[in-house]
Amino acid sequence: MNKEEIKQYLPHREPMLLIEEAWIDENGVAHSKYKIKEDEFFTQGHFPGNPIVPGVIQCEIMAQSCAILVKDEIPGHITLYAGMDKIRFKNVVKPGDVCEVTATLDDRRGGPQNMLFFCSAKLEVNGKLCCRGQLSFALVPISE
């Protein structure tokens, strides 16, 4: 999926849509990519002269990638973080880097009105692990 196709599933929009390309492979694993631009809002003050992507943004990139795993269930819902566990940061991410995320669905609970998903994800740049962890999110019906 390209960015416009991703927008059909994820409720995020610029500047918070943080995946540009996504697909699910034959094993049910989600993959996504996002290139960090030089003028990202989150690197402007983090840190002047030495811009580094904040960890929470790396987690958001992973979370959006995890949501792709259940993309067909998203319409009519909003995706909300429920938790982050065992998050580890191994290397910095900088402007110009292409973040590549791999995500798997580990478990799901609940029914149509209360869905909760548990995933594992890792974010790499040029094959080098930058961030990994377990993320959970809820699909909450959009109120009319």
Image: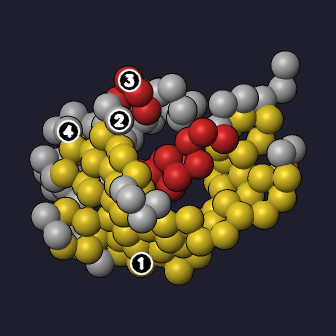
Name which of mark 1 and mark 2 comes first in the sequence.
2
Name which residue type carries label 4.
Lys
Mark 1 lies on a secondary structure that is strand
Residue with the mark numbered 3: 4
Are discs 2 and 4 less than 8 Å apart at CB? no
Q: Crowding near pointer 1: few (<14 within 10 Å), some, many (20+)? A: some
The picture quadrant where one finds residue 72 is top right
Element type at mark 4: loop
- Would you name the residue on which mark 2 appears? 1
Spatial CA span between label 3 and label 4: 18 Å
Q: Separation of disc 1 and disc 4 at Cα?
A: 23 Å
Amino acid type for the residue under numbered disc 3 = Glu
Asked if the residues shown at circle 1 and circle 2 are in contact, with their CB atoms under 8 angstroms apart, the answer is: no
Spatial separation of the CA atoms under disc 1 and disc 2 = 28 Å
Q: On the rendered structure, is 92 left or right of 23?
A: left
Q: CA distance from mark 3 to mark 1?
A: 31 Å
The quarter of the picture where residue 20 lies is top left
Residue 82 placement (x, y as % from top left): 70, 59
Quote the CA–CA distance across marks 2 and 4. 20 Å
In the displayed structure, would residue 8 be above or below residue 66? Answer: above
Q: Which residue is mark 4?
A: 37
